[in-house]
Image (tube, coloured by chain):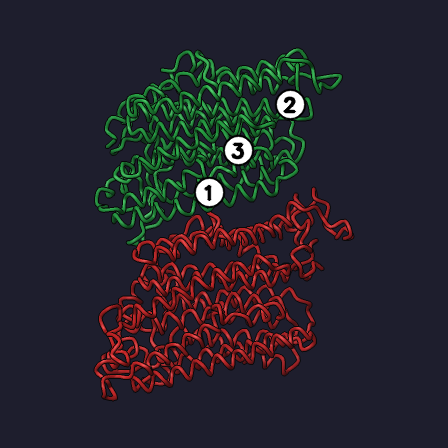
Chain colours: A red, B green
Amino acid sequence: MSLIATLLDFLPEVLLLAGALLVFLLDAIGIRRIEVVGSVAVGAILLAMLFVFADLGFAPVAFLATVPTSLIDAVPASGSTPLYWFTSLGFFFQIFFLIAAFLVALASMSRPSHERGAAVFYGMILLATLGMMLVAVASDLIFLLIAIELVGIPSYLLVAYTRRDVRSMEAAMKFFIVGALSTVLSFFGASFLYGAYGTTNLFVLASGSAVNSGALGGGGFPLLVAIGYCLLIAGLAFKITLVPFHAWAVDVYDGAPDDVSAFLAGGTKKIGLFAFFLVFLGPVLLIRGTVEFQWFGGIGPVALGPVLQIVLSVLAVVTMTIANVLALMQKSMKRMLAYSSISQAGYMLIGIAVGTAPALTGASLQVFSHVVMKSGAFLVVAAAASLGVGPLIADWRGMGQRHPWLSVSFAVMLLSLAGVPLTVGFLSKFVLFSAAVEAQGYFIWLAVAGLLNSALSVFYYGRVLKVMYFDGPDPALPAPPGTDRSASEAAPVLALRAGGIGYARATTIALIAIVIVVLGIYPGPLLQPLAAAAQHFVNLGL
Amino acid sequence: MSVPLISLTLASLAVGTVATFLAGRYARWVALGTSALFLLEIGILFSGYAWPGLLHGIPQFAFYESHAWISIGWLTINYTVGVDGISLVMILLTGILQIATVLYTWNEQNRPAAWFGLVLLTCLGCFGVFVALDILFFFLFWEAVLVPMFFIIGYWGGPNRRYAAIKFFVYTHVASIVMLVGLLALAFYSHAASLDFAAVYAAEPALTGVVPAFLFLALFFGFGVKFPVVPFHTWLPDAHVEAPTGGSVLLAGLLLKLGAYGLIRWGVEVVPNGFHTDTPILLVIAFASIIWGSVLSLSQRDLKRMVAYSSINHMGIVLLAIALNSELGLVAALFLMFAHGIVSALLFMTAGSTHHIYGTRDIPSLGGTASATPRLATAIMIGSLASLGLPALISFPAEFTALLATWQALAYWVLIPLVVLVVTAGFYIWMMQRVLFGPPKGIPNPVHDLPALEVIAMGILIAFTVLFGILPDLLVHWIVLSPIGVWPL
């Protein structure tokens, strides 16, 4: 395969890289206005998104497709061990990642025009997105882990890019140390798997064939496989913040600049989930009762798939329950959102534990809705911070009256996070939990646990709504500009400007709220192709 | 059927609700207009149902509409609505209580636009529950009722409103979850073609063994909390005591009926095998609710709390009538639901007005109100007499049918509800004796009797109480028009 053809396959990624380089170039020649830099980044992201949509075959732009359709959703020839492969589900995840980057990039253009570090911020967003895009096409463990690392390093920098705030620096250090540890764990796990299978190719790992036949002879190495998967679960669990590997996330999301929190919680965290898809769906689907391996000391035969499913189920239930309970106790808005983000990871993990095509559809949809809702929620927090609202939930008293449109948008996002009908958050949970029920067996209890957790989560989201709408404004606060309710209700755009959060941020937030409601009511255009993609993915057997 | 009347009604209610929220100080007029239009549409639904040739599918529904919403192979969800006699009766109740509530709370001063909007939203949700013939949309509307009621209690309620609102929400929401999983399991375990009522209904016989019994129990848990049945009833008195009067009216009149309606529509009709297996459990819980609700109301000092506990008693009789597993029992249950909806709404209105006029609902600190406020006293009297089952008022034919059905099915077990009925009559008469008559107590000077709008609101309910009390067939006609005969009872 020629270099040109390969680069064409990766055109969206190349565009992101070019965008990042252009951003740094502009910085070097002294063009640092956030509007210019931001426009370059947003442009690169949108262009990349256009080409991914084209590769997915969306009718109006399909002619722009650069990846040959014969390569998409195709099983590689037997014996070949490709580093990457193209699946329509991977393309969907690329779009989700690009959406997260787009939202944050667009909203951040409302920051002060001459703020320092615009180039670092946008450059790192683009590079991290590039890494996320590569995760979505990986078919080799080493490729996958290097792509994850490519996301990690820009993210550490993003957390610390302001270089002034001590809390950000602390968060960045924590993030860096935990990130390095999780990478080490993952690579260590990969090396064990390499020892057992003689390869890190995911197709070979997924087939599980080497375990019994013993590529290295001697009836396989079950202990190597077990340790390898344990370490991989631990390493990747750090990335998607599963309990008990979650503690760093709260401090990092809390300490990072608000826009960066939106990107981390809404965007980068999801790569771990797709990595879980890649690493575990194969074993879960293929080794379900078919390939068994003899345990040491004559215990067994034990099928690998069901064991992995139980481990993942337990992780899912523990994650969502503990995170929800902890979220209930939070007084800080960002910490509450961070815990809610952790609990959402638990919901998504249900999809992997169940491992059927419907469950995969549900989990992917949940990823999408979480990208939109959680980025949106953190962006609203960023907007509120720019209005002088404090970090505590109690500081949001009377927001409903003071900033009606911002509050309504936030309410839509919180309701969606809580899974209230007519929002995309409800739809994704409904599909996910339906899929768990559909799979029968003990998975119905995953649905029950998930639904009970949703009920629990209603409280901490509801508490914010209560504070915003039911508790009167804090009497100690001076009346901010734009409190004249009749004027602000008459002219929403004016109210947004009077609120002082800036057009770009206001547009982003409004866009997110609209998408949440529209897709909640009319999900067909997204759900239909997503379900087909999930089906393809499962049919491929990886 | 070419005219999608149910969708139009839903749309008119939705538009009316949104318009009410936005209408500012004209909200009450928009709400009134929406309610009037709703009543007109209900009239058309009734006349259309009697028209032959509208029935569709089995079980048979009129004004049936079905449009694909999600179709991804394993999960097919259609927007499906339709009405039969059972839902029509409940829809009529919704329409009556909606306009009565709007009129009763006409002078609401605290955020009137939000108040009337939430009232309409509650009624929209109830209407949706009564017409939805698809698991998802049923659940959507079911939950759509919960949210406005949470805000109605939590914002306009009494001093302890926060606790009451949250308790209400927790109880009913957890129940909804179990119900939803039960319904989904019903569809998926029986491999129904879609989540439609008709599809699940057709597929249910595929379930074997203990599965239907467990699924019915899950559904019963979900619906039973809404009823509410003992031992899941404790949210109800708290919610009622703290709720504003309009909220209590909707809560007792409509929300409790959702549970009973759901049990009939999605439990008894769809999972008859599970229903048959679980009948003893239902009977025990029904008797417990009847006795417990009645005994507790006897010991209440608060007028509203007393009515709330008597609701548990009445809904217990509804559950008993359903659990009898006979056609007569179902007719009685539906009639009782309607009767209780009207009468409890009336009683909660009078309790609210009592509080408004006398500043207290404490029964022992009231007395001699009959001479001070004759209009209010009349309303209390009619409501109480109707609730204790005086002939010629609406509850009498309903309860008589229920007892008759109990006698047919369970013979001497009928003595339990009969004896309890005497207790019920006892606490209502005792309450009237203390509050209406006796030496004047706690009467402010000057005292204002009911304002005209409240008289109109209560008058509407009293009119229906008398009308269906004397001519029960006007209502029963629609219930028996439903193909109860073809139900696999």
Q: Whole-Å distance between the Cαs marked 2 and 1?
A: 39 Å
Whether residue A432 is situated above or below residue A213 in the rendered picture: above
Numbered disc 1: secondary structure:
helix
Q: Which residue is mark 3?
A: B120
Residue occupying the point 50% across, 30% down:
B252
The three-letter code of the residue at mark 3 reads: Leu
Marks 2 & 3 on one chain: yes
Which of the two marks, 2 or 1, is nearer to us in this view?
2
Residue occupying the point 34% across, 48% down:
B184
Q: Which residue is mark 2?
A: B364
The three-letter code of the residue at mark 2 reads: Pro
Using the image, name the chain to which the residue with label 1 belongs: B
- Label of residue B143 in the image: 1
Q: Viewer-proximal residue, B237 or A250?
A: B237
Residue occupying the point 41% across, 22% down:
B43
In percent of width and height, residue A426 lies at 45, 51
In percent of width and height, residue B189 lies at 27, 50
- The count of marks equals 3
- Displayed quadrant of residue B137: top left
Using the image, name the chain to which the residue with label 3 belongs: B
